[in-house]
Image (spheres, rainbow, N blue to C red):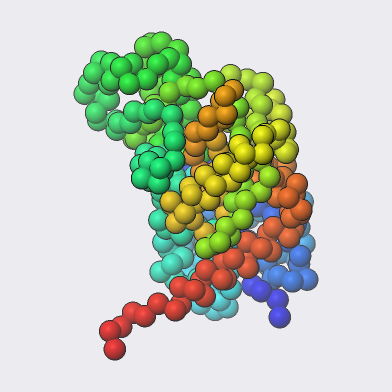
């Protein structure tokens, strides 16, 4: 029997376009003889649209942006619920990057409906999205990190001079300023002086009310892919070499100005330490399914964890699938493994008892 799979993509997020590219790539790798595939598109305005069954891979992003079959034009989430009630989805594959999808909101909704879904749960997704919470969990797990300062919009606006001084006292230039709750390097910029710091914070505040300012470090950027539930496996390491000042949105998705080196040339013990730290980071956020763990490795092989991404870029040329491809797990097999892990985690949750008898 085929599994009925729902691909959930788009979303009310600054990473909407990235999600569309991911959805198209996944349709091209799914085995349609094994899965009945249904697209579930969320518009930039937040409207849910359940499309007709896909019988072959999408050849373009436009094919996946179908119009609503509902008479209403508002956020018709009931269309999705009705479709599920009429013929239940066996697994939902969320392909939503960023806020309103990767941050635990959709995961919570699917938990309420008791539908198995690929990837991290509510806690893992929320902690993986909020860089401040993530850093605090990493600190509790004993994972080394670069120094950082964080604050919210109202604190900054009421005391810009004080928080600028706090950053300069705790950190040194250059600093990297980031929205706490966003991915794909959206809203991130580098500051080399107080004027640039203020400008960078203003830019980041366009995307989130909570800001993280991190100490810049001269280091290699190394990434590892983690796959599994309670017994996660780790891929070979990859290295990112951006030609620009840092690995920003354009160098990730637009201009191709970044070299990906897989496997990364690392000493055996350094790689072993990275694997151990990647597993610790995965468990620190109560990870499930997948994460990409990102690290800084200095010239003297000192390691700092940068972050984990709970739904990393997932096209065939993205780092996460490429890392597994070089670990002998091709892209179509990776998708099957993730679906199987979703069913495994859901089955394990059904063992819980909700009454006291």
Q: Is residue 350 depicted above or below 119 in this figure?
A: below
Please provide percent x and percent y for residue 110: 46, 65
The extreme front residue here reads 269
Q: Quadrant of residue 335?
A: bottom right
Q: Residue at x 46, y 59 (%)?
A: 121
**Residue 100 visible in this rendered orientation of the protein:** no
The extreme left residue here reads 158
Please indicate whether residue 293 sits to the left or right of residue 175 in the image: right
Q: Where's the C terminus, which quadrant? A: bottom left
Q: Is residue 201 depicted above or below 9 in this figure?
A: above
Please provide percent x and percent y for residue 182: 46, 39
Q: Residue at x 49, y 74 (%)?
A: 348
Please provide percent x and percent y for residue 243: 67, 21
Q: Is residue 350 depicted above or below 163 in this figure?
A: below
Please provide percent x and percent y for residue 40: 58, 60
Please indicate whether residue 338 sits to the left or right of residue 280 in the image: right
Q: Nearer the viewer, residue 163 or 285?
A: 285
Q: Nearer the viewer, residue 14 or 317?
A: 317
Q: Nearer the viewer, residue 93 or 326?
A: 326
| Count of numbered badges drawn on the protein | 0
The extreme bottom residue here reads 357
**Residue 324 visible in this rendered orientation of the protein:** yes
Q: Quadrant of residue 206?
A: top left
Q: Residue at x 40, y 36 (%)?
A: 180
Q: Where's the N terminus, which quadrant? A: bottom right
Q: Is residue 99 depicted above or below 50 in this figure?
A: above
Q: Residue at x 54, y 47 (%)?
A: 276
């Amino acid at each position: 029997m085929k599994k009925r799979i729902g691909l959930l993509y788009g979303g009310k997020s600054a990473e909407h376009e990235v999600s569309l590219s991911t959805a198209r790539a996944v349709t091209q790798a799914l085995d349609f003889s094994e899965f009945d595939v249904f697209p579930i598109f969320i518009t930039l305005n937040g409207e849910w649209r359940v499309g007709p069954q896909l019988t072959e891979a999408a050849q373009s992003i436009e094919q996946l942006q179908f119009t609503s079959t509902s008479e209403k034009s508002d956020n018709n989430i009931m269309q999705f619920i009705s479709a599920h009630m009429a013929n239940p989805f066996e697994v939902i594959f969320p392909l939503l990057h960023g806020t309103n999808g990767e941050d635990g909101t959709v995961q919570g909704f699917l938990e309420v409906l008791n539908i198995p879904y690929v990837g991290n749960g509510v806690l893992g997704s929320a902690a993986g999205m909020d860089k401040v919470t993530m850093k605090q969990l990493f600190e509790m797990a004993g994972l080394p990190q670069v120094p950082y300062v964080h604050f919210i919009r109202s604190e900054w606006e009421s005391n810009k001079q004080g928080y600028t001084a706090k950053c300069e006292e705790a950190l040194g230039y250059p600093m990297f300023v980031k929205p706490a709750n966003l991915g794909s390097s959206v809203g991130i910029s580098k500051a080399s002086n107080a004027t640039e710091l203020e400008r960078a914070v203003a830019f980041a505040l366009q995307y989130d009310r909570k800001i993280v300012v991190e100490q810049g470090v001269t280091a290699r950027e190394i990434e590892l892919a983690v796959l599994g539930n309670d017994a996660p496996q780790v891929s070979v390491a990859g290295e990112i070499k951006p030609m620009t000042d840092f690995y920003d949105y354009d160098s990730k998705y637009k201009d191709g100005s970044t070299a990906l080196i897989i496997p990364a040339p690392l000493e055996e013990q350094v790689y072993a330490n990275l694997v151990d730290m990647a597993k610790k980071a995965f468990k620190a956020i109560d990870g499930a399914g997948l994460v990409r763990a990102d690290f800084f490795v200095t010239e003297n092989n000192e390691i700092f964890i940068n972050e984990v991404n709970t739904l990393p870029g997932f096209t065939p040329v993205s780092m996460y699938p490429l890392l597994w491809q070089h670990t002998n797990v091709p892209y179509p097999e990776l998708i099957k493994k993730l679906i199987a892990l979703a069913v495994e985690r859901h089955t394990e949750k059904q063992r819980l008892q909700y009454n006291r008898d």
